[in-house]
Image (cartoon, rainbow, N blue to C red):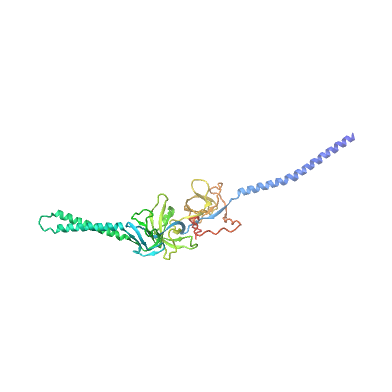
Amino acid sequence: MSDSKSSSARFTLVILVALAVFAGLFLVGYLPRQRQEKARDAEAHQLAAAAPTVTVATAQAAPDTTTLTLPADARSRRETFVFAQANGYVKAWHADIGQRVQAGQLLAEITTPQLDQQVAQARATMALARTSYNRLAGVRLAGAISKQEMDAAQAQYAAQQAGVQQLLAQRDFRRVTAPFSGIVTQRNVEVGALASTSNAPGSQLFKLEQTDVLRAFVQVPQNFSPAIRAGLKADFLVPEFPGRSFPGRVVRDAGALAADTRTLLTEVQVPNAQGRLRPGSYAQVRFHLPRTAPSVIIPANALVPGGTDARVAVVGPDHKVHYAPIVTGRDFGAQLEVTQGLHGGESLVINPVETLAEGETVTTRAFAPPAKPAGPPPAKPRPNDPDAPRVSSPLTAK
């Protein structure tokens, strides 16, 4: 009996010890975890109650000028094809490509055998008409020759004279001369070649150009056209002279936009007295356009995503967020032009999130440009690269 009681007491003791161990382990593991959860809840509550932090950048007023670079069609100041004005054969030519000639200088001589025969025939016909007229005028018998017959004979003689003069004037074109001073850029004649008065393509004898001044024709987009005016200075750029620009000046524009491209044809004249620039080469013209209306430059990622109207989030002096509608102008890639809605100097939220509410209080930090990634240095840009952006940002243009 005593053995059973002692066994029961030992069992009870073991159970109590096991319960005490489990209770101790529970308390050791649960209480720290509960304290951590309370700390996290308190921290989360504190963060939720604190003002969110946003990155801001300052809107900057656009400078007085904008740099715009556009491709240009470079031509000579004057250029023309020289055609034959009398049918015949080339007897000799006296000017070749690259040769500078003066106005009236002989370029080629043409023999005109057919025209010579026509002149001889016309002279014979004129002599006959003169003889007939003189014969009628020599009749002294009154009333033998009517006034109408005399007038007809006189008119016939005058017409034959005019015909001879016309043929002689045409024969003077046997001498092909330069219409103005310039340089011969094409010669399409050889001795013995047939010269025709046709003006069909390929029938020209020479091409003459004046290259002391170049005319650069540029198609200016519509949004820049209000700044184009006569006398505006511009830079003429060609790849053959990297890092160098040639001064030019706007002399005229078309006065109306092309309906198909919405561009304004503009002519820029560039002095070329030393002949370094060549017509027909690829070229660009860089304009320094004055600002026609006040505008502001903002980062492109300051736009609020979504919606049909452009908006930005502005942080006021009270550190509260206010959404402002804007009207955008030109797109410079990483930057945008704002023509209405901002005055410059505003603090704009960069990459605003959708949860940012109107009137919400925020804390700000200044935007810092990202560091350049490590690696080899970027390739040096090609001078006057035709693939480079045509419009430079006003805040980064030099």
Q: In this view, does 12 lie to the left or right of 47?
A: right
Residues 45 and 130: in front is: 130
Q: In this view, does 137 lie to the left or right of 45?
A: left
User: Residue 36: x, y in percent?
Assistant: 69, 47
User: Residue 60: x, y in percent?
Assistant: 50, 57
Residue 137, quarter of picture: bottom left
Residue positioned most to the left: 142
Quarter of the picture containing the N terminus is: top right
The residue that appears at 74% across and 45% down in the rendered structure is 29
Q: On screen, 32 above or below 4? A: below
Residues 298 and 58: in front is: 298
Residue 49 visible to the viewer: yes
User: Residue 358: x, y in percent?
Assistant: 53, 48
Q: Is residue 141 left or right of residue 75?
A: left
Residue 210 visible to the viewer: no
Residues 127 and 302: in front is: 127
Residues 298 and 332: in front is: 332
Residue 145, quarter of picture: bottom left
Residue 131, quarter of picture: bottom left
Q: Is residue 61 left or right of residue 82?
A: right
User: Residue 377: x, y in percent?
Assistant: 58, 59
Residue positioned most to the bottom: 274
